[in-house]
Amino acid sequence: MSNNDSGRYLLAHKNVGDIRGNFFVPGYQRGYRWTRHDVTRLLDDIWNSKGKDYSLQPIVVKLHCQAEDPFEQEWELIDGQQRLTTLYLILRYMQKETNQGIGAPYQLRYQTREKSGNYIDSLEESSHEDNIDNFHMFEAYGAIDTWFKQGGDKFQRNNIAGQLHSMLFNSVRVIWYEAPAHVDAIPLFTRLNVGRIPLTDAELVKAELLSSVRRQSTERAHEIAAQWDGIERDLHNEDIWAFVSGLAKANADERYPTRISLLLDTMADEAGKPGGKRPRYHTFDTLQPVIQSNYQGFWKRVVALHAQILGWYQLPAIYNKIGFLVACGQSFGDLANAARSKRKSEFDNYLIDQIRNQLKVQAADLGELSYEDRSKKLIELLLLMNAETSSRASMRMPFAKHLEEHWSLEHIHAQNADLLNKADQWKTWLSTHRPALDAIASSDDAAEIEGIRKAIDRALTEIDSGRSGAFSSEKFSALSTTILKVLSRDTAPDHSIQNLALLSSAHNSRLNSSVFEVKRQMILELDREGSYVPACTRNVFLKYYADADAQQAHFWSERDKISYLDAIRGILQPYLL
C-alpha cells in the first residue's frame, strides 16, 4: 500500500449486525477452508469478550456495485471470506436451531463456485461431499452445533444464543477497511493472504490518520506520510531500536513488522494498559477516536516520542541506563511517560532509582552473591557494569549486539574438568590446555611441565587411534587433575561475583571447565575474530582491574579477585542499596 493510496482508504468499526449487502467472492480466492478448531476458537473468543467491545480481524472490501438500498449494495470481498462465512453460519444456526434472530443481514456469492453459495443456505448432509467447499461448511456447522450443545439443554442453549446474538449486534465488530475504486484487488489480496502478511495496527492507524488529514489538506497528508516513513526508517537503526525495544532483530521483525508500532502501543497504553494478553487491534481501537477528534494533537505526540528517543540516543549515559532497564524487562512506554513530567536531571535520578529497585542488592552483600542461587541477579549486575563502563567512556553500550546473544556467567577460573566424558571433549580440552602450559613454563618447573606435555601428546595419540580402551575416563581424570594442579596453583573453588564474568552461551561452551590462561587466550582470539565480547569481560582477562604491582598474566589470584570486586563495587555504587 503506497503512501498516496493509504490516505484514501476508508476505515470504520462495524458491529457484525450492521454489515449489510451482498459480498462477492472473486475467482482468484480459494474456497472456504476453516477447520472445526478455527470455528470453535472464534466462538470462544466472542464468548470470552463478555459483551465488551471486541474487534475481529479486518474485513477488506472494494465497492463492486453501488445501490441506494444497503441490502442491495455489492462488495468485492478482498480479505475476510473465512470470517464472514463463519459468522454467516453462526447466525444461521442460531436462527434455525435456537430461534434467535432472522439470520445474517448479508449474503455471500461466489464467482466460480455458485453451488457453494447455494449450499451455505441448505447445508444438506447428502451433498456435503460434493465439493471441498461444501465439506468444510458442513464441518463448520457441525462445530457450531457441538459448541452450543456443550452449554447444556435446549433452554440453556437458547439463553447462550440470546447472549451471543446480542454481542454480535452490539459489541463484536469488524474493522471495515474499504479500498478505493482504483486499487487493483488482486495484488492487495496476494499481500494479505498468499504472503500471510496481516494488516497491522500501524497500517490501520496510518490509513485513519491520512484519511483524516486529507479531508483538510492533501499537501499536509503528503507531509505526514513522509514524516511517518522517516520515523520508521530511524527506528530501523538497530542501535536505536535495541535500547528502546529490548528485542533482537529476529524477534523484532516478528513482533513489530512496522516499528512505529512501539510508539503507537505506548500512546494507546497511556489510557491504561490492557490486562493479560493484548487484545487484537487494541492499539487501533484505542487511537482511532483520538485521531478522529484531534489528529493534529495525535501526530504531535507521535513526533514528540520520536524526538525523545533520538534525544536519548545522543546521550550515552541516559541511553545506557534505559537500555539496561528495557533489557531487564521494563517497559519503554513507562519510561517515556515518566520523562514527560521531568527535567533532564530529574529523569536521570529517576532512572537511577529504577535501576536500584530493579537490582535490590545491598552493597555489603555484593561479594556474597553466589552463582549457585543468584545467577539471574549476577547477570543483571554484570550487564549494568558493562553499561556503566560504556557511560564512563562517553560511549553507547552495543545493545544491538548484546540482544543477539543468550548470556551466561563464565567462571574466570575453573578448577575441574569432571563434566567432560567424551573422547572429542577430552581431545579439545587437552589440546587447548597444552599451550597454556607453554605460557607459564619457567626454568624452575621446566622438567615437570615438559613431562606433562609429553603425557598430553601420548593421550592425544591414543584418542586419535580410536581403539577401544586406548584412552579412558580414568586416564583423563588423572591427567587433567595434574594439569589443573599446575595451572591453578591450588586456588580454591569460587562461585562468587569476583570469579565471574559475562559471556554468551555459545562462547561459554567453548571455554567450559578451562583454567584462566586457556580462557584468556580464547577471549583474545574471539576479540581478534570480531566476536562481541563485553568490555568488562575483556578487561578481566587483560587484567585491567589488577593492581599495577600485582601483574602476572597467566593466573587469577586471590589478589586479582579482590581488585575485581572493588572495581565492581566502585562502578555499581550509585545503584546499590
Image (spheres, helix red, strand yellow):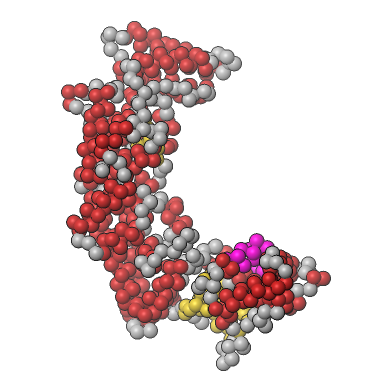
Q: Is residue 353 above or below residue 175?
A: above
Membership of 43 in magenta stretch: yes
Q: Tell which of 200 and 182 is nearer to you.
A: 200
Splitting the image into 4 quarters, where does residue 412 fall?
top left
- What's the residue at 38%, 33% (across, down)? 371
Name the residue at the right extreme: 126
Q: Is residue 77 above or below residue 531?
A: below
Q: Is residue 450 above or below residue 18?
A: above
Q: Position of residue 359 (x, y in %)?
A: 32, 44
Whether residue 47 is visible to the viewer of this picture, yes or no, is yes
Number of callouts: 0
Which residues make up the magenta segment?
A: 28-45
Q: Is residue 408 above or below residue 78?
A: above
Q: Position of residue 286 (x, y in %)?
A: 42, 71
Name the residue at the bottom extreme: 68
User: Is 341 on the left or on the right of 216, as rendered?
Assistant: left
Membership of 242 in magenta stretch: no
Splitting the image into 4 quarters, where does residue 138 fall?
bottom right
- What's the residue at 44%, 52% (across, down)? 250
Q: Position of residue 62 (x, y in %)?
A: 54, 79
Q: Tell which of 60 and 497 is nearer to you.
A: 497
Q: Position of residue 468 (x, y in %)?
A: 59, 16
